[in-house]
Amino acid sequence: MQLQICTTIAALFISFIGILLLVINTEDIKGPVQIVLDAGSSHTSMFIYKCISKPKESDEVLKEVRDQLKTYPFSFKGKAYGWVTVNYLLEKFIKYGFVGQWLSPGRDTVGALDFGGASTQITFETKQTVENKDNLMKLQLYGRDYQIYTKSFLCYGRDQVLLRLLALLMKTQGSDRSIVHPCYPAGHSDSIKLSSVFDTPCNKRQTPYKPDDDLQIKETGNYDQCLGNVSCRFSFNKCSYSRCSFDGVFQPNITGYFMAFSAFFYTHLFLQKAAGITITSPAHLEDAVRVVCNMSFQEVNLILRDHLRDYCADSILLQVLLITGYGFSDLSFPHISFQEKAADTSVGWSLGYMLSLSNLLPAENVFVRKTLRPDAWRTAVFLFSALLIASIFFLLQIYQKNGTKLCR
């Protein structure tokens, strides 16, 4: 009797597993574990230790990690996933309405402007022809097609441009010992190790130098000289396309609204506070940057104590990127919203990447998505009913046999 009960329970369990395997859409199943990294600097170090006691298993794990890292969107898709994050949080794709249904908001998407330590990115939807297909990405989300222009400029992040600017000043002034820095506030001097200038992939020194030597910096705070030196780090002359941003990179005309976050937000916030100007146009931006760059070290110190010597260079870099580089004009600049967060959530590419992996951003319209395919649903109901009837029948048989034995 116990054997029959165990057999019945086992049959039910195996049948249940079979139903799950039948009805779950295996195309929607993703890998159970993946590594998600965020881009915060010029390089990210990863240390993975091998277990000497199990060399075969360790080698297999390391191979899986290497193969997985090769699939990550560091060079291209990360920029588009940042755009996905912004528009998902702002409910530009889809929103849950008061009627208890998912609705399409019918609003245009928002472009994304990111300014990190190692790179700067621009991503926006465009209907124009993208002449360089390397900067084109097509997505289908909730039944709608999106043509996205996306470009990441490595070594044009805040930290890397400041280091490249130091290297430029050393080269133009012909000294490894002391330089005059027009982007640092006047009335102050400082010194740094040469190793801190050249120990980066974006700023490798071609000639030998002594890493432990000190570089003396005299700070002068001159807007025009700083603007000239920062602009030298960009190339605005060479362009083999109908239109370029800088360094010969194609970019279609700016259209729509944008959200600027990361260092864009913090620099813009400081500029308005320091200059006392509400920045709504390129002219306002230039006036505010000029005020900040002509401040003395003591004046800047009264406003902000952290990273105060870098804010002139940061501000000019923001000005050059947005106005001269990306091409925001008097008409398009007011369409930039400088925000720290979107819908009270920090913005980054990792959220958009995880949303895509988890299938929360489906290609098809949400109204036509079903939890189960019709054929699978009918099969599941039939199998469940048949198994339920068979199980009841077997249990009744066991109960009747048990009752007969007790009567005897």
Image (cartoon, helix red, strand yellow):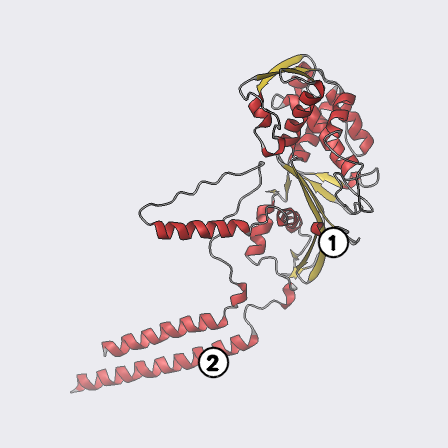
Q: Is residue 281 left or right of residue 215?
A: right
Residue at 50 percent of width and 38 percent of height = 45
Q: Can residue 283 be seen in the rendering of this structure?
A: yes
Location of the N terminus (image quadrant): bottom left
Label 1: few (<14), some (14–19) or many (≥20) C-alpha neighbours in 10 Å: few
Nearest the camera: 308 or 203?
203
Residue at 54 percent of width and 56 percent of height = 358
- What label does residue 107 carry, if any? 1
Residue 381 lies, with reference to residue 126, above or below; the image says: below
Quadrant in which residue 257 is drawn: top right
Spatial separation of the CA atoms under disc 2 and disc 1: 44 Å
Q: Can residue 276 be seen in the rendering of this structure?
A: no
Nearest the camera: 342 or 33?
33
Label 2: few (<14), some (14–19) or many (≥20) C-alpha neighbours in 10 Å: few
Residue 304 lies, with reference to residue 107, above or below; the image says: above
Q: Earlier in the sequence, mark 2 or mark 1?
A: 1
- The residue type indicated by label 2 comes to Phe
- What label does residue 382 carry, if any? 2
Location of the C terminus (image quadrant): bottom left
- Residue 399 is situated, as x and y percent measured from the top left of the image, at 26, 82
